[in-house]
Amino acid sequence: MNKCWRQPGALFTVVLPLIALAVIGCNVVLPAHPHSLAIEGEEVQIKMLNVDGMEPYKEDFKAAFGNYPKEVYNSQVEIGCNSGDRAIALLAPLALAAVNAAIGWVTNSLAAESDRYVAQFGYAAALDQFWEKPSCGTNDFWVPHYYGLEMNRLVDPCRTNAFHLVCGICPSHDGTMFQIKPLIYRSPRSKAKVLSDNGWTNWMLWKWFWSPTHEVKTVVAVEIDSAWVNASRQYQTATIAAFPLDLGSYNINSNTDISLSERNVQTSGWFPGIPRSSVYDVHDAKLKYSGTFTLKLIVTQTDPSNAKKLVKQASELVTSKRTEIIAIVTNGMSSANSN
C-alpha cells in the first residue's frame, strides 16, 4: 500500500474534498421548488400612483404614514392656498454631497454582500409630473402629484404576476422631503432558485444538510435621478436618492399579499423634492405639472437556505486541496500499476 495513504490525515485530506466535489456535482441536480427559477417571458413594469391610484391601498398607507393619501394631498393643497407661494428650491451643493455619501454607502454595502445574491431583476422608468399645481391660484405653489408606486414582474406561462410591490410616498410636514415605505409585497414565483424538499426528495440526506425553507428573501435597491433646466438654461442632472428596502422573506407556497405594516417592517428611505426647471412662466395657467425624474428599482432575491454558502465552501475547499488531491491520486495509481 502506498505510504501516502498511511500518513496521518491523508484519508481526511482526500475524502473531504471528494465529498465536496460530490456536493458541487449535486448542486446541478438539487431539486428546485416548482415556484422558483421563474424566468421565461420576463417583463418588469413600474407605475407611479396618484391619489386615486392609491385608493386600493389607502388602509396600508394610513397604517404606514398615519393619514390616508387623500388627506395628505388635501392638507398640502390647503397649506399652499392659505399661505401663498411655497416653491421648492433646487438642490444645494451640500445636499448633493450628502446624497453622494449615501450612494457610496449603499453601493459598498451591496458589494460586500454580492456573494449572497442569487438572482436580480429591475427596471428604470423615465417619468414626469412629480409636482402638480392646485387650482386655487396662479402662485408658484406646487403639491406632490404621486403618493405611491407599483412594481410588477410578469412571466410565462399566462403572464403570471410573479412579483408585486406597492410602496407609499409621503411628504414631510414642510413638503421638501419624501419618504418611501413598502406597503404590499407578493412574490409567488421566485426568479432565484429555491430548494425543494417535496416528493421523492424527502428521504434524502441533503434535506437536512441544505435546510430548504420554501422562502425567498427580497431586497429592493432604489435610485432616483432628477433632470431639470436651471435659470441659465443649462441642462442639469443629479442622483438625489439611493437606498435599500429590505422586504424580508416570502413563502413561495403562498400567493397572497403581505401587508408589511402588519408585519411591522420598518424599512424605508428619504429623498428630496424633485427639482423643477426654472425657465417657464410661473403664472402660465396652462402649466399644470412639473418635475422630471428617472426611477430605478433593482430587486435581489436570495434563497435563505445554506445551500449557496455550502457549495461555495466546497468549491473553495477543492481548489485549496487540488495539488494534494492530484499528488495522492497520482501516487496511488502509480503504486497500483507497479503491482
Image (spheres, helix red, strand yellow):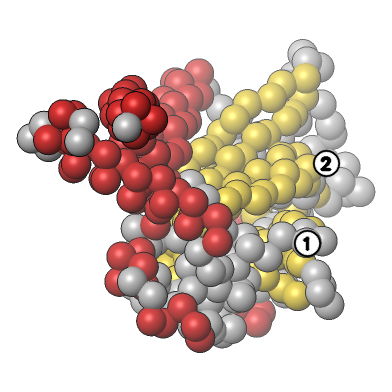
In the picture shown, does residue 222 fall above or below 33?
A: above
Task: Give the residue type that dot 2 points to.
Answer: His
Residue 210 picture quarter? bottom left
Residue drawn at 76 percent across, 67 percent down: 155
The tag earlier along the polypeptide, 2 or 1, is 1
How many residues crowd around disc 1 within 10 Å: few (fewer than 14), some, or many (20 or more)? few
Quadrant of residue 188 in the image? bottom right
Quarter-of-image position of residue 226: top right
Would residue 259 be seen by someone viewing this image from the given angle? no
Quarter of the N terminus within the rendering: top left
Q: Residue at x 41, y 45 (%)?
A: 21
Indicate the position of residue 200 as horizontal and vertical percent values.
49, 83
Q: Is residue 188 visible?
A: yes
Secondary structure beneath dot 1 equals loop
Q: Is residue 307 above or below residue 52?
A: above
Q: Nearer the viewer, residue 144 or 101?
A: 101
Residue 79 percent location from the top left of the image: 56, 58
Query: Which is closer to the viewer, label 2 or label 1?
Result: 1
What is the three-letter code of the residue carrying label 1? Answer: Glu
Q: Say above or below: 177 vs 59.
A: above
Judging depth in this view, the residue of 54 and 217 nearest the camera is: 217
Q: Which residue reaches farthest front?
A: 339
Q: Which residue is mark 1?
A: 40
Kindly report the distance in space between the C-alpha atoms of the residues bearing marks 2 and 1: 51 Å
Q: Position of residue 143 (x, y in %)?
A: 65, 54
Q: Look at 86% across and 46% down and name the residue there.
A: 287
Q: Which quadrant, please, contains the C terminus? A: top left
Marking on residue 283: 2
Q: Give left or right: position of 165 versus 14.
A: right
Report the front residue among 6 and 142.
6
